Image: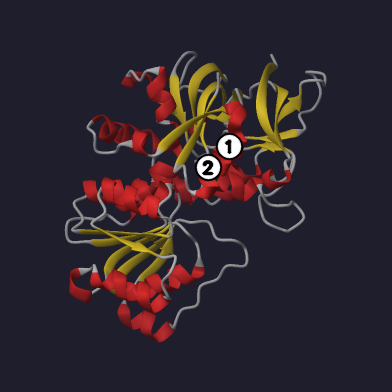
Amino acid sequence: MATPSKAIVSRGPFSEGKWAIEPVTLRELKEDEVLVEIIASGICHTDLHCGNTPDDKGVPAVFYPRVLGHEGSGYVKAAGSAVTSVQEGDAVLLSFSYCGECHVCQTGPPSHCTKFFEINFMGEPVFSPASGSSESTPTIGGRFFGQSSFGGHTIVSSKCVVNVSSLALSREELRLLAPLGCGLQTGAGTVINVAKAGPEDSIAIIGLGGVGLAAVMAAKNAGCKRIIGLDRLSSRLDTARELGATDVVDTSDKSTEELVSAVKEASDGGLGATIVIDTSAYPPLVSAAVQFTRYLAQIIQVGTGMPEAYLNLHMQSFMVSGKKYYGAVQGHSRTSQYIPELIRWWREGKFPVEKLVKFFDFEDFAGAIRGMGDGSVVKPVLVWR
């Protein structure tokens, strides 16, 4: 049976006023899908990467119309015939999807699935304008990151679903924890699962939005001896200190040489950082990171760079230093195991998500996005009634 609902439909870039709440009808479920009533959804910069770019600029994964959103939480309304992980009424958090069949999914973290881009960014039509017949072919894209959680109801891949019904979360708690499915798991997971940071590490974190501040909290939990936060906004530098950063660096008024000097000074008497997590994908900052790390350091890129962004390396010195520069997606998380671990941290007071989140009614999605853009909000969460 087709399901009526509402959704934030992107028919063009947000900055051009082409996002709006529309009545929609969802198509019928496939056997490996789940119908979820969304109660909350975090907003991530990737939603804007794909929803605030004209579709004639050749940027992969940008097309319209579509429903975005990929940090959803809610309750299962129905499950397809092949789904065994959830049943009607279960509380769920939503994360990324993957094929489950390629060599990476079989042997490594599914966040590096060989079909990750296709499955998570290209989606498929799920929604139809409510004015059309329920039997008509859907014309509005869904299943963004397998979920498209900017809707009151959505159809998701069963692989996106993390069943948390056994954790006895209240509706308010489920609402608060919605961002665990992408940004917060990416930051924390990159520290714990990817870098495997520990007490001997001096870690530098570039960009202190939701991902970067989650990394700060995880680095504190890992016992890193120095935690250095870099950002251009003083409010976020203050929040980083509150959450565990031992040092902060304001990037807004510093040359590359000054940045290198500041981070090295904060790292074991000038040796430099052992780990860098870059959430900015801004080449000048990543270039500085290559310089302010010590020999054998890890430089891990988690920010999404634009198509024209490149990094230049001096090959001989990079080789001699033994440094590693590589990318990581979603903190190498196996979501059904890692998201409950983050919830345990939160309950123990070691992962205070509430210090990052500000709630917005779904009708005020524009205000939520503006707050994220001007830095007054770290992690906006849209609440559906």
Under mark 1, the amino acid is: Gly
The answer to whether 27 appears left or right of 295 in the picture is: right
Mark linked to residue 277: none
Q: Residue 131: name its quadrant.
A: top right
Q: Are marks 2 and 1 in contact (CB under 8 Å)?
A: yes
362 or 295, nearer to the observer: 362
Element marked by disc 1: helix
The answer to whether 224 appears left or right of 208 in the picture is: left
Q: Is residue 227 above or below residue 175?
A: below
Q: Which quarter of the figure is the C terminus placed in?
A: top right
| Total numbered circles | 2
Image coords of residue 220 (percent x, y): 23, 49
In three-dimensional space, the C-alpha distance between marks 2 and 1, rounded to whole angstroms, equals: 6 Å
318 or 184, nearer to the observer: 184
Under mark 2, the amino acid is: Gly
Mark 2 closeness class: few <14, some 14–19, many ≥20 residues within 10 Å? some
Colour theme: secondary structure
Q: Is residue 203 above or below residue 72?
A: below
Residue on which disc 2 sits: 371
Q: Residue 285: name its quadrant.
A: bottom left
The answer to whether 195 appears left or right of 68 in the picture is: left
Q: Residue 274: name its quadrant.
A: bottom left
Q: Is residue 194 above or below residue 35?
A: below
The answer to whether residue 50 shows anywhere in this view is yes
Mark 1 closeness class: few <14, some 14–19, many ≥20 residues within 10 Å? some
Q: Which quarter of the figure is the N terminus placed in?
A: top right
The answer to whether residue 115 shows anywhere in this view is no
Residue on which disc 1 sits: 367
